[in-house]
Amino acid sequence: MPGLKIGRRPIWRNLAIFMAILGPGIITGSVDNDAGGITTYSVAGALYGYNLIWTLIPSFLVLVIIQEMNARMGIVTGKGLADLIRENAGVKITFFIFIGLLIADIGNTTTEFAGVAGSLSIFGVSKYISVPLVAVMVWVLVVKGNYKIAERIFIVFSLALLMYVVSALMGKPHWHEIGHAVIHPDFPVNSRSLAVVIGIIGTTIAPWMQFYMQSTVIEKGLKMRQYKYVLVDVIIGCLATVIVAFFIMVACASTLHVNNVVINEARDAAMALKPLAGEISSEVFAFGLFIASIFSATILPLATAFYVCEAFGFEAGIDKKWKEAPEFYWLYSGIIVLGVIIILIPNAPLIAITLWSQIINGLLLPVVLVCMILLVNNKKIMGTHVNKPFQNIIGWSSIAVLVGLSLMLILMPLFKG
């Protein structure tokens, strides 16, 4: 008996195809909720309650637009974004762009290991135990595994981030107030609130994400005939990003904000939840931070090794053996080792490392996005799959907003006081 059909295919066959393609969009979107992102959302909820939740709407739209272009370019060209930048911008420009990205991502990876240390310290585990163990685990996963196994583990990590829903619900949020705050937000407009708004919108998109997304599309060997499934994957990934962000903000707004609790990082939020929403809520929040940190500590150095090797013509990919791609594996291993060493140094300046990595990201993000949108409109590269006029309008507008936000984020400290 024929099954229910969508178009010319039975629905079960469409679902089977989608499940096979599932991965790049969801993983890239989910890993965006790293230790830095969770800290940003936690601070926003604690400081301003529900009143900055509205920022997740434009964040979602920008993320979908950029990631769709990125995935389409990977499918059509079969080349990584770094490859395309080198071929069209030249080696010198590529060198300076990627040296900056490499430095920033070493700092970002260190921040992720800081998230591992902070989250497990709540359970009484020393960073001198947790950080080396996690580092060895993620190294083995990538170096000794293959892409299919790694991707499935990453998807499980993505689903695990939904535990923030549990933490938020245990805080007994007021849904009517949330709806009112989204439509009519009420917060003081000053340098501090503007910085938080910039942080929320800016944390949804980072330079390394574009390179990783395009590399994974190529790694899976996806073709244009599968584009509609890839698009669904991208949209689901972007939705996962904002849903997790939403519930983190709700968890902190409904507990910390109403009790005037001030926090500086995600670990502070997990600890502060204990007397307000119960030990389980605190532990769930901390475990979510651990999952996000270990997830990002795997993906960030992996993405960095991918795009640096692509940019300079070296073999890259976790389905390759060490002898087939030695530069890729040495770089991946080196970034992890550096991150671990830095985080284990007593009194390491982690705040300064985080700040400078964000500044470098802010400087390079507009450059990467402009390169990307120029490439996706090049008919010699994309053929008939270049952007349509409305996509260019939305794309350039999004880039203009991101450039403005990045510049404000960089220049704002100069005007404090």
Image: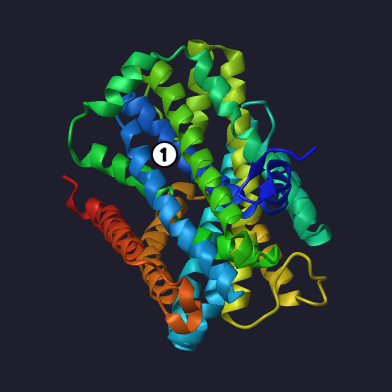
Q: Is residue 106 visible to the viewer in this orientation of the structure?
A: yes
- The image shows residue 156 at horizontal and vertical percentages of 70, 40
As drawn, 102 above or below 191: below
Q: Identify the residue at the far front of this view.
A: 1
Q: Callout 1: helix, strand or loop?
A: helix
The one nearer the camera, 74 or 409, is 74
- Is residue 196 found left or right of 340 in the rendered image? left
Residue at the image position 46 percent from the left and 12 percent from the top = 172
In which quadrant of the rendered image does the C terminus lie?
top left
The one nearer the camera, 236 or 360, is 236
Residue at the image position 80 percent from the left and 77 percent from the top = 324
- Is residue 105 found left or right of 197 in the rendered image? right
- The image shows residue 40 at horizontal and vertical percentages of 41, 39
- Is residue 140 found left or right of 268 in the rendered image? right
Residue at the image position 35 percent from the left and 65 percent from the top = 366
In which quadrant of the rendered image does the N terminus lie?
top right
- The image shows residue 322 at horizontal and vertical percentages of 81, 71
Residue at label 1?
Answer: 40
- The image shows residue 208 at horizontal and vertical percentages of 51, 61
Amino acid type, residue under disc 1 in the picture = Thr
As drawn, 313 above or below 347: below
Q: Is residue 264 visible to the viewer in this orientation of the structure?
A: no
